[in-house]
């Protein structure tokens, strides 16, 4: 079985409509984990995200954010290996409404999307593009999108055999790990006042495109087809969060 991967930094040709829409939204990380998980269930049904899995994800999320110190795994050279960290990605409208989001995990310099949702037309695309900008700016080298689908191919993805993907996961755990910014605190105006302007993250992709001179078409229907996701943590390469 193959995995669908996007190499980062990766230049994307972003349509004018997506750039314009992105000005109305902000992106946060780990600000509304439970709400994002519920949004995924509402859009796709329980599917693989059934109650015991949701309970485990919530426990992992709470553990990684509550622990003051975490034990580090070591590779065969005695150097620390990056842990797998589960995250929620949120896209907020100016009104403070959560309009799109996804669950995923970061393992070293590789990010894997698990499942996502959207509540307004076009917000799925904005969330994906803003996330791509965030991943690029935070040191991610690969974005794992699970099974290949038509809209993913439009992003410029490539297929990788499962065995090669497992080797890549292990390789991405060595060295300097990518990191997400810490979650902002909620305030009286809600999520809309927190996080990063989506258009700035999309603009980061545009600057990368100019610098590299590379282009890959992104169809205007790309991220409106948010699927339930097929990704799972592979115990051979990514371990669970350890306190």
Image: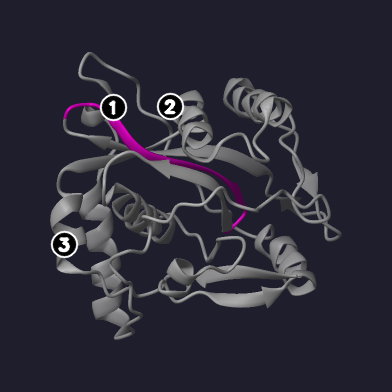
Task: Give the SS element for disc 2.
Answer: loop
Q: Describe the element under mark 3 as helix, strand or loop.
A: helix
Residue position for label 1: 191
Q: Main secondary structure of the magenta part?
A: strand
Quadrant of image for the C terminus = top right
Tell me: residue 146, above or below residue 239: below
- Residue in the picture at 80% in, 71% down: 163
Q: Residue at x 43, y 34 (%)?
A: 182
Q: Which comes sooner in the sequence, label 3 or label 2? A: 3
Q: Residues within 10 Å of mark 2 (few under 14, many from 20)?
A: some
Per the image, label 1 sits on a secondary structure element best described as helix
The residue that label 2 is drawn on is: 32
Q: Position of residue 184 (x, y in %)?
A: 35, 27
Q: Position of residue 241 (x, y in %)?
A: 71, 35
Q: CA distance from mark 3 to mark 2?
A: 27 Å
- In the picture, measured across the screen, residue 124 lies left or right of residue 2, that is left
Q: Which residue is mark 3?
A: 17
In the image, the segment drawn in magenta is 95-109
Identity of the residue drawn at 65% across and 53% down: 230
Disc 1 to disc 3, C-alpha distance: 23 Å
Would residue 166 appear left or right of 60 to someone viewing this image?
A: right
Q: Residue 160: x and y, percent?
A: 67, 76
- Closer mark to the observer between disc 3 and disc 2: 3
Given the current orientation, which residue lies at the most extreme top position? 188
Residue 56: x and y in percent read 71, 28
Among the two numbered marks 2 and 1 on one chain, the one whose residue lies closer to the N terminus: 2
Do labels 2 and 1 touch, CB within 8 Å?
yes
Residue found 76% across the figure and 65% down from its top: 166
Is 102 colored magenta in this rendering?
Answer: yes
Instruction: Rate crowding at label 1 as few (under 14), some (14 to 19) or many (20 or more) other CA atoms within 10 Å.
Output: many
* Rendered position, 182 above or below 152: above
Between the C-alphas of marks 2 and 1, the distance is 9 Å
């Amino acid at each position: 079985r193959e995995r669908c991967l996007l190499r980062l930094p990766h230049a994307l040709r972003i349509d004018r409509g997506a750039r314009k829409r992105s000005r109305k939204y902000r992106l946060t990380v780990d600000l509304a984990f439970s709400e994002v998980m519920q949004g995924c269930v509402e859009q796709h049904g329980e599917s693989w995200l059934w109650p015991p899995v949701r309970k485990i994800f919530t426990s992992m999320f709470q553990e990684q954010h509550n622990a003051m110190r975490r034990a580090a795994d070591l590779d065969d050279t005695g150097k620390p290996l990056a842990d797998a960290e589960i995250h929620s990605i949120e896209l907020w409208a100016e009104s403070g409404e959560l309009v799109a989001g996804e669950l995923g995990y970061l393992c070293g310099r590789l990010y894997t999307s698990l499942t996502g949702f959207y509540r307004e037309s076009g917000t799925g695309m904005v969330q994906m593009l803003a996330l791509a900008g965030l991943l690029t700016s935070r040191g991610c080298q690969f974005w794992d999108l699970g099974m290949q689908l038509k809209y993913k191919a439009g992003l410029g993805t490539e297929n990788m055999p499962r065995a090669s993907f497992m080797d890549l996961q292990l390789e991405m755990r060595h060295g300097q790990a990518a990191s997400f910014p810490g979650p902002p605190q909620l305030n009286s105006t809600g999520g809309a006042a927190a996080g990063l302007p989506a258009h700035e993250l999309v603009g980061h992709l545009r600057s990368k495109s100019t610098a590299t001179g590379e282009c890959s078409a992104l169809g205007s229907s790309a991220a409106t087809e948010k699927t339930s996701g097929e990704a799972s943590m592979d115990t051979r390469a990514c371990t669970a969060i350890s306190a």
